[in-house]
Image (cartoon, rainbow, N blue to C red):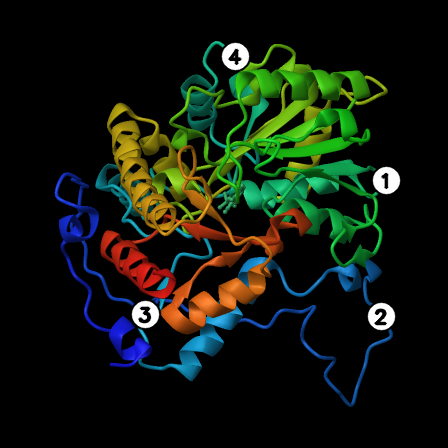
């Protein structure tokens, strides 16, 4: 049997055969069908060759857009996956790449959204534009659920349509004149939005964009940057648990970070989108660190907790204590940006968010998170047993696998070609990601098991 034929044989539904007798993972009821529902085929602006058109406007292209390397990482992966599916129309492609959730949203949450949605068809239940900052009840629930006793109040919370849009709105807040530092590797939205804003110089292969301070996070430094070698910047993007490395900073490390920001007069933008995935006893919020409210903004999301990647709901915390160099409160300017660029999160999504934070909703979210964490264990176990150095997984739904000396796009290509599994090349997250591949634990159990079977086949 050829490799491809072998790989497309049917999926075993037995996890115990794969994992050994003593492992019992929860199998949530699910129908698994391999081809992705929505293979997002898109053209990536920066990679599309200039089309010859008869007519051109007189508007010059934003030079910052021209600095961007290739497309945004995930559309680029989607493009390659689509090309692969054209090449192998019968292949059962499994996506452990983009980091999109797959498990259904718990019913306690969808029923709240359905109720709100039906209410919109009634005179009493109808509402139009809401407060740009979000509904009072939801802001209060976010404050009390995630920031109790941390000095964060309801009016410090700005509800949004997701953390990614908030990252861009924060860039608009800071403007083009600031300098920025970022963990290397990290979620690409920080760097790309910074480039678009004009905060950076040109891209240089293997170094990244000029003027960005790349804070190397490697196995050697335990994925926490050596701050003694980091130059001062105005803004420091910091994501913990980190996407893609899956590592989470300890209390001591975050205390160093807050101190570093304070000494330099910098603002930390702390991304805690995966905080609830933490198994270790690390801080779930930067505001757990004394002094955090004077130096940090925190952004987070319901996307990976409740399967809201499509529903769209997140939030950003801007504490009153955070001030610009002239003493002006950052929150007041952010409020102005939000009111100008955004008209508030969907009222249906906000009802869902409120349901997420009810006692039943919190329990249901923990169950979904627990399920993905079991997937993570399966992936970690697979690559570890194959002799790879494997990082992450324990505190985040991402497994960071080392392929020393190899190009991560090449490894991505080889895995896709030979196993029909989509991963994410580490170099897409910054120069420091070269030689790594990120494997996402977001997937139906049977698909994760099948992907791991194929990995074992490939690397045995
Ligand atoms: C670290 C990090 N922040 C933010 C986001 C985006 O979250 P949202 O779906 O709320 O826009 C992601 C999505 O993958 C992420 O990994």
Q: Is residue 52 above or below residue 144?
A: below
Calculate the distance from the C-alpha at mark 1 to the C-alpha at mark 4.
Answer: 31 Å
Q: Is residue 260 above or below residue 406?
A: above
The residue nearer to you, when weighing 131 against 334, is 334
The 10 Å Cα crowd at callout 2, few under 14, some 14 to 19, many 20 or more, is: few
x 32%, y 44%: residue: 381
Tag 4's secondary structure? loop
Q: Determine which quarter of the picture holds residue 175.
A: top right
Which label lies toward us, 4 or 2? 4
The 10 Å Cα crowd at callout 3, few under 14, some 14 to 19, many 20 or more, is: some
Which label lies toward us, 3 or 4? 3
Q: Is residue 208 above or below residue 144?
A: below
Look at the numbered disc 2 and say if its residue's Cβ is closer than 8 Å to ligand 1. Answer: no
Compare marks 1 and 2 and give the one earlier in the sequence.
2
Look at the numbered disc 4 and say if its residue's Cβ is closer than 8 Å to ligand 1. Answer: no
x 63%, y 41%: residue: 167
**Residue at which label 2 appears:** 59
Compare marks 3 and 4 and give the one earlier in the sequence.
3
Residue 169 in the image: state x and y as whole percent.
Answer: 66, 42
**Residue at which label 1 appears:** 177
**Residue at which label 3 appears:** 35
Residue 359 in the image: state x and y as whole percent.
Answer: 27, 23
Label disc, if present, on residue 150 of the rendered structure: 4
The 10 Å Cα crowd at callout 4, few under 14, some 14 to 19, many 20 or more, is: some
Judge from the rendering whether residue 248 lies leftward or rightward of residue 192; answer left or right. Answer: left
């Amino acid at each position: 049997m050829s490799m491809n034929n072998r790989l497309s044989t049917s999926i075993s539904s037995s996890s115990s055969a794969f994992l050994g007798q003593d492992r019992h993972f929860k199998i949530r009821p699910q129908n698994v069908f391999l081809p992705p529902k929505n293979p997002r085929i898109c053209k990536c602006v920066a990679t599309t060759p200039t089309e010859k058109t008869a007519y051109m406007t007189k508007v010059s292209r934003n030079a910052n857009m021209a600095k961007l390397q290739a497309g945004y990482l995930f559309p680029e992966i989607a493009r390659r996956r689509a090309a692969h599916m054209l090449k192998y129309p019968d292949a059962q492609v499994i996506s452990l790449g983009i980091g999109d959730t797959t498990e259904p949203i718990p019913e306690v949450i969808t029923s709240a959204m359905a109720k709100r949605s039906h209410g919109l068809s009634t005179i009493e239940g109808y509402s139009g534009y809401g407060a740009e900052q979000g509904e009072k009840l939801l802001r209060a629930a976010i404050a009390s659920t995630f920031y109790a006793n941390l000095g964060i109040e309801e009016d410090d919370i700005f509800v949004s349509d997701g953390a990614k849009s908030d990252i861009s709105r924060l860039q608009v807040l800071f403007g083009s004149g600031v300098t920025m530092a970022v963990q290397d590797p990290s979620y690409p939205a920080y760097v790309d939005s910074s480039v678009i804003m004009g905060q950076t110089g040109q891209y240089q292969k293997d170094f990244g964009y000029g003027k960005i301070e790349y804070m190397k996070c490697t196995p050697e430094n335990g994925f926490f940057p050596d701050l003694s070698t980091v130059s001062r910047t105005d803004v420091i993007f910091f994501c913990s648990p980190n996407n893609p490395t899956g590592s989470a900073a300890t209390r001591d490390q975050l205390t160093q970070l807050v101190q570093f920001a304070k000494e330099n007069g910098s603002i930390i933008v702390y991304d805690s989108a995966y905080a609830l995935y933490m198994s270790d006893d690390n801080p779930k919020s930067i505001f757990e660190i004394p002094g955090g409210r004077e130096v940090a903004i925190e952004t987070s999301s319901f996307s990976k907790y409740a399967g809201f990647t499509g529903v769209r709901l997140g939030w950003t915390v801007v504490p009153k204590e955070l001030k610009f160099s002239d003493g002006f409160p950052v929150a007041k300017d952010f409020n102005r940006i939000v009111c100008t660029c955004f008209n508030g999160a969907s009222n249906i999504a906000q009802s869902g968010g409120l349901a997420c934070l009810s006692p039943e909703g919190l329990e249901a979210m923990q169950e979904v998170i627990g399920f993905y964490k079991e997937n993570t264990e399966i992936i970690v176990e697979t690559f570890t047993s194959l002799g790879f150095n494997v990082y992450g997984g324990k505190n985040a739904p991402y497994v960071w696998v080392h392929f020393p000396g190899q190009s991560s796009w090449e490894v991505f290509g080889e895995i896709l070609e030979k196993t029909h599994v989509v991963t994410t090349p580490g170099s897409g997250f910054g120069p420091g990601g070269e030689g790594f591949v990120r494997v996402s634990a977001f997937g139906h159990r049977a698909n994760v098991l099948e992907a791991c079977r194929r990995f074992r086949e490939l690397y045995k």
